[in-house]
Image (spheres, rainbow, N blue to C red):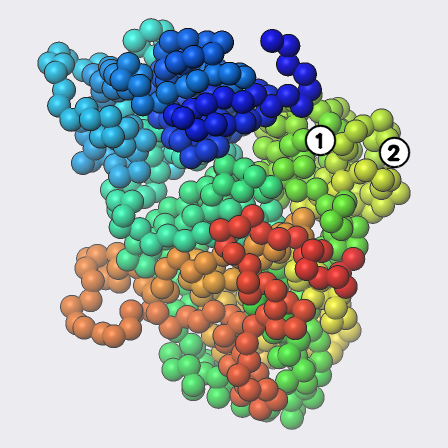
Amino acid sequence: MSLQKGFMPKLIIDNIAVEVAEGVTVLEAAQSVGIHIPHFCWHPALGKAGACRVCAVKMVDGPVKGIQMSCMLPAQDGMVVSTTDQEAMAMRRQVIEWLMINHPHDCPVCDEGGECQLQDYTIAGGHGLRSYTGKKRTHINQYLGPHIEHEMNRCIQCYRCVRFYQEFAGGTDFGVMGSAGRIYYGRVEGGQLESPFSGNLVDICPTGVFTDKTARFRARYWDYDMAPSVCPHCSLGCNTVPAARYRELLKIVARRNDAVNGWFICDKGRFTNSVVNDPARPRYPLVDGRKVGWDEALDNLLLRIREFGAVHGPESLAIVGSSRLAMEAATLLYRLFAGIAAGSLCYFTLEEEADQARAAITHLNDATSASMGDVQEADLIALVDCDLLQDGPMMALAVRQAWRKGAKIFLVENDVAPEAQKGLPFEWQSVSLLSDIPIREARKPVIICGRGKGMQDVAPALTSGVKLAYLLGGPNAFGAALLSAGHGATTLAQAVASGKVKGILAVEVDIPPELLQGISFIAALDWRATAIVKAAHIVLPTTAWVEMDGTYINNEGRAQRFKKVMHPGLPIMGLDPAGHPPRRHETAPPGGEPRPAWQVVADIIERTGTERDVQPLSGQWQWLRHLDAESPGQRIWQNMKQVK
Ligand code: FES
């Protein structure tokens, strides 16, 4: 039968009529109506390989007959498929038994145990006893760096790892060697994996060949506290699931969002748990280095602010937030600024970061803003002043997917150091100017702007149909820029240059030492042990993003909510040098004093007497309260008519 454009094959799977788009496989067609067919080598992001043979189904009638691999077979009109046919089930059972001939029975000591596809299908298929009595094939494992544990004996040769690492992510230091029954996935020589996306091997392996070494032997799947979250380590807003146990963040895995990160995350987002578990984190309110209760700290803060105002004038105080502050607290900063009649309100410290975020909110709207999903579909991409692997690694992965489909990539020669281009997983053509790129000839062109002067060249290149993406300075830089513009805020650098600032109330912000010259009073709200926290007269500890609910607006203007994963508190393993929990009963966890930044800011506002019962996200931001953390997020333009 000749298939015309727009043709939708109709088939029957387990007595359910299914209609799917042309090119969809039988396995995907079954999934579309909720029928699950076992699979190892097929993956939604990688497609089919036909390697594992566990997706067998029986084609009962129609153009194809007999036992077939459902991941390899395109759905065709008139097919009648059975996934429960005895012959198909026997085939799947036998495949599992063959795979288990060499797979070690080591689930009790395997970190994948409890979240292992092979374990699930083995049990589901009824293979409880093995009849094979011979010796199992064994391999020697490799050291793959500090993050990933290698256990080749568990391999079922599905090729997912190498397909991801080489084809999807462009890595060249890891591959498949050997043949037949001696296939080996690894490096030519042991050593740290070079790809900045190597951690995805942990998620993509359907069994325990690659596991997260940083969480090794620490918990089982059911032990973890988990919740949908958003990565805070750059502005792209990749979706994650952090997993914690006993107040310690143990690991982070990717969460699917097709418009943002797809199925994957970068290693920076996956392996940066230590900032949350850092023993040096501020855990208690401090006044002049003395541990105090919250009431005393807040009273003291208000007293100091009044004394400071009496000496220097209240206008000498600057309220300083940052792009790492979630919207809940960021939207309260103006009310704090008004409540204590401070002189400067800053959402950015340095001009460069503020300029870049300002450019993003000026040029982006629902039509022009490119998501990473849009980048993957582009046919021409111009990179302007980008250090992709530093400022947004997953954007580099998105550009690679477009390049694999034939997109032309241009790199405008600029101020970014040549080292920044090393390791980019795609080929490009260098040009001197943005105007040298044939943007008008492309059907789906995207310009990606990093930091630096090049972004000023972008405006003239904007014609209809061109989409733009910015790599901004923090997870909520876009939101901070909206608030900064809305409130007419300045940058700290500008406020300090005016010579007026003598005191700083710093809310989750890093401030370079040169901006602290001549500052006589510092109060700091933060969860990181930053230089400003160490220098502060008053420290109010806040919760990390995994310890609270919150909202970030990512680089494309997409608001995404994240949920609390764990209670704040000292990790049990860090409480005592001997690693033992406290030997006394307490109602609150030790080190559990940190509060969400919005709550601390609200407490300060209430103590000024200007407002009561201060709640975050009110007025034009109220819609953010109803965002579902499990949804793909919402772009701001659909909810805020007044935003361009
Ligand atoms: Fe079809 Fe592996 S999932 S052969």
Mark 2 CB in 8 Å range of ligand 1?
no
For the residue pair 614 and 10, the one nearer the viewer reads as: 10
Which residue was labeled with disc 2?
Answer: 435
Give me the residue at 68% from left, 85% from top: 341
Give me the residue at 37% from left, 20% from top: 82
**Residue 71, disc:** none
Q: Nearer the viewer, mark 2 or mark 1?
A: 1
Q: Is residue 14 visible?
A: yes
Question: Is there a contact, CB below 8 Å, between mark 2 and mark 1?
Answer: no
Amino acid type of the residue that numbered disc 2 sits on in the rendered structure: Ser
On the image, the x and y values in percent for residue 313 come to: 69, 88
On the image, the x and y values in percent for residue 436 come to: 86, 29
For the residue pair 627 and 601, the one nearer the viewer reads as: 627
Which residue of the protein is positioned furthest toward the top in this rendering?
180
Q: Quadrant of the N terminus?
A: top right
User: From the viewer's perspective, is residue 197 above or below residue 603?
Assistant: above
Q: Residues within 10 Å of mark 2 (few under 14, many from 20)?
A: few
Which residue was labeled with disc 1?
Answer: 378
User: From the viewer's perspective, is residue 323 above or below residue 387?
Assistant: below
Circle 1 — which element? loop
On the image, the x and y values in percent for residue 227 come to: 41, 53
- Mark pair 2, 1: CA separation: 18 Å
